[in-house]
Amino acid sequence: MSTQSLDFEEVQRLLSSFATPSALLELTLMLGCLALSWLIVSRLKRFAPERPASVLFGNHVVDGVLFPVLALVAAFAARRTLPLLGIKSAVFKLIIPVLVSLVVIRLTARVLRAAMPESRWVGFLERSVSWLAWGGSILWITGILPAVMEELENISWKMGSTQVTLRAMIEGSLTAVFVMVLALWLSAVIEGRLLRNATTDLSLRKIAVNLTRAVLLFIGLLVALSAAGIDLTALGVLGGALGVGIGFGLQKLAANYVSGFVILAERSLRIGDMVKVDNFEGRISDIKTRYTVIRALNGREAIVPNETLITTRVENSSLADPKVLITTLVQVDYAADLDVVMPALVEAVSGVPRVLQEPVPTVQLSNFAADGLELTVVFWICDPENGQGGVRSEVNLSILRTLRRMGVEIPYPQRVLHQAAGLTSASPPARP
């Protein structure tokens, strides 16, 4: 009997079974399974922490992974009870493949969106998985799937001393994809829990996340390769070749990865620190395994390889103490009473909101300049990530207002000319 006749007969039997009275009972049971799943997920979502685009719950109740999984479990249980009632399954034979496809699509889509939210390949992978899942469900429903699998089993070729069939390759690839998706999901869940409400020890949490993700992906890769029928003993040769490649062409890449873990472990640089690297100053916004992102106060971002942060000098304003000293200069007239002016300037600087009261601001007579007395105003701030230009401007304005109120002049450049004694201006000789 040909595949087309099998297809036609299976579809005809499936359509005719919908006309039986038991189909209405099955439909009622299926609606009950969906309602029960919706109720359970709704109750569980109330106790779950609020997270956007959750893998289990999604944005709404029905667009997560948990709803189709519970509906599939309930549908299987209901289908098992039908033979006890003397009813032959018809609706569930159609619904269960649909629910299986829906679980695969939702799981893949949600996990990829959570693990790689900015990747351009996510949409393509989602569409590919959707087409494969729905195509497999159609083959399952119409009864063609066993015949297709038998044909795939007959297609084989020899790889070394191993005979490989196309069916084994497809099944292994699908299993590998499923295992990698689960590994990505677990790593995303662990990352979300470790970094949730992280205000302290963010660097240690980051290294834990990176190590956990690397271990899970490595284990997932081994399981996926084993499921695909690849002999893991061959990885010894691959590991040796990879070691040679790292020793020659990939040594910079490997150095950056190792440096990233060293930075996170030593905590010499932490997320949130204000640093200056190669005349670029900014705040560390993220530390990746290969590079570090530094965001300047003007919005520009620099991607610095981790090896550079290990081998070059880095100025860290927040390593031991976030307090930063700032100075500004002002000149006053030589006639000014410094015993009155200096305490007034200290009081004016202390009134600026971002200036710390401890250590207390100070005013020092730093130089006898040509045009006036040069005063150095010293003050401290504890938020260098907000910049220094704004607070210095506020301090200068406060100093200017104080000097004007006290009537103290800021001298202009002056030059004193001395005329030698006994010299008189001679009149020019008369012209003939």
Image: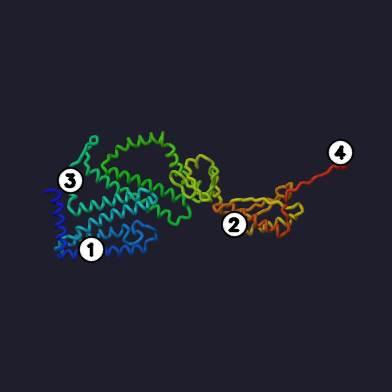
Front position among marks 4 and 1: 4
| Residue closest to the far front | 432
Disc number for residue 275: none
Residue 419 in the image: x percent, y percent? 83, 43
Q: Earlier in the sequence, mark 3 or mark 4?
A: 3
Residue beneath disc 1: 30
Q: Is residue 54 left or right of residue 142?
A: right
Residue beneath disc 3: 150
Q: Earlier in the sequence, mark 3 or mark 2?
A: 3
Q: Earlier in the sequence, mark 4 or mark 1?
A: 1
Q: Is residue 415 left or right of residue 176?
A: right
Residue 39 in the image: x percent, y percent? 30, 65
Taking the spot 52% from the left edge, 40% from the top edge, the residue there is 312
Residue 186 in the image: x percent, y percent? 35, 52
Residue beneath disc 2: 354
Front position among marks 3 and 2: 3
User: Label 1 amino acid?
Assistant: Met
Where disc 2 sits, the SS reads loop
Inter-mark Cα distance, 4 to 2: 73 Å
User: Label 3 amino acid?
Assistant: Glu
User: Label 2 amino acid?
Assistant: Arg
Where disc 3 sits, the SS reads helix
Residue 273 in the image: x percent, y percent? 52, 50
Q: Quadrant of residue 350?
A: bottom right
The image shows a total of numbered marks equal to: 4
Within 10 angstroms of label 3, few (less than 14), some, or many (20 or more) residues? few
- State whether residue 170 is above or below residue 59: above
Inter-mark Cα distance, 1 to 3: 32 Å
Residue beneath disc 4: 431
Residue 364 seen in the current view: no
